Amino acid sequence: MSLQELNGRNVLVLGAYGFIGAAVVHAFQAQGAVVCGLVRSLPTGAKVLPGIALKQGDLRNLVQPDAWRDILSGVDVVVNCAGALQDGGDDDLTAAHHTAIAALGQACARDGIAIVQISAIGAEENADTHFMRSKAAGDAALRSAGVALWVLKPGLVIGQSDYGGTALLRMLAAVPFVQPLAYPDTSVQCIGMPDLCDAVLRAVAGQLPQGTYDLVEDEPHTLFDVVVATRAWLGFRRARISVTIPRALTRAVAAIADALGRLGWRSPLRSTAMTIMTKGVIGDPAAYKAVTDHPVASLGDIYASIPSAREHRLTARITLLMPLVVGVLSVFWVLSGVFGLLGLGQAAEVLTSAGWSQTLASFSVVFWSLVDLALGLAILWRPWARRACLAQFTVASIYLLIASGTVPGLWLDPLGPLVKILPAMMLSLVAMPMLESR
């Protein structure tokens, strides 16, 4: 199929450095379109999309049509790939999915700009989750705006990179020996990222009639089968035992993930994702198949077309281990601070025996114990987590230098108080790349 109609088209992609957005940007670039990305953070956008023109904008601040005027200057088509799973941190679903998109629709209708809206299977007015209801409200607002519109509703998107549902699949597949899974019999239909990008390109090139399309493979699979296929694609051994996680435990995990979401952690285990999994991801491919000669590839064909490499296995394992690493570091530093305060007298005695005054020794123990507590808590706040790891490494280095010069005999202590700092320092360094965004 020729996509020459894209040459010279000015396309603006919202959510340009996201999982879907980045793939869509590269697809347009490969076809000769003039593509620009709207991103929340220009530094992150420059890192993820080097060489791509970017505009800064936060959908929470774009809830009036006039706010879009400068952003839409010179644009022929907008592709909306922006979205969030759940409220929390910097995410406001009502703004991101509805009010900002309604304003976008009015602005585009005024200026004659077309819109390709990436929605979701299950986005209905009476859906069980705020995610789906807000998506449906945004879809409805665009339809009522009278703008040239394509609403694409992909199933579970599988791509070369990972985020959201794809990250969850790979994390579950990385569990060794045992395959834990909630709702293993849930029905799921997938779509590969190349097919999703192809549908977007067809819409913009005028080779797909305006309308709403479910972008899913023909046959559904159970969630268990999808995880098994993901495990095989990654090159992990098939699990020896499969364990169905009880619903009560699933709800408890989701509640914990929701609480962490208020601290900025965008876990794929939050309650919205779990609720969606109870309903399944099922669409009707008939409308799309009727107007295209390029049906959506099946799950087997999707994985057969995507090379699997060591970095995919490593990322899957990192995703699985990161909560444990962060938790261990938090507990280590918090307990270090607590034990320092509780054992103030004993800890100060080590310093006074080295010639320190009682006042200075006690002050030092209290001060550094409070620093330890602060670092143990700081790593739990997602925006600070990476910097907290660097601070932990720095503070631990200071401990080693001061202790080595003041009480070098601690290196020979049978309990190894100084030796034990070394693995904690290394764990902080290991956590830093784990915590790098995007």
Image (cartoon, rainbow, N blue to C red):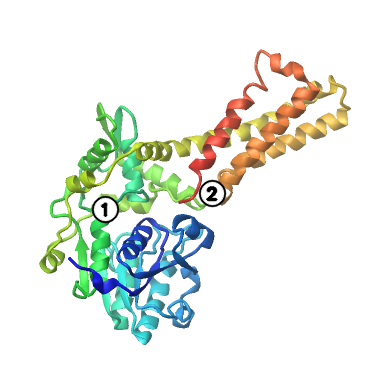
Name the residue that disc number 1 marks.
Answer: 156
Residue 203 visible in this rendered orientation of the protein: yes
Residue 342 visible in this rendered orientation of the protein: no
Disc 1 or 2, which lies upstream in sequence? 1
Q: Inspect the image, locate mark 1, and give the three-letter code of the amino acid beneath it.
A: Leu
Name the residue that disc number 2 marks.
Answer: 382
Could you tell me which residue is drawn at 13 percent across and 69 percent down? 291
Q: CA distance from mark 1 to mark 2?
A: 26 Å
Q: Inspect the image, locate mark 2, and give the three-letter code of the amino acid beneath it.
A: Arg
- Point out residue 146 in the picture as x, y percentages from the top left corner: 29, 83
Is the residue marked by circle 1 packed among few (<14), some (14-19), or many (20+) residues within 10 Å?
many
- Point out residue 102 in the picture as x, y percentages from the top left corner: 38, 77
Q: Nearer the viewer, residue 217 or 160?
A: 160
Quarter holding residue 417: top right
Q: Nearer the viewer, residue 432 or 264?
A: 432
* Relative vertical location of residue 67 with respect to residue 90 in this rendering, above or below: below
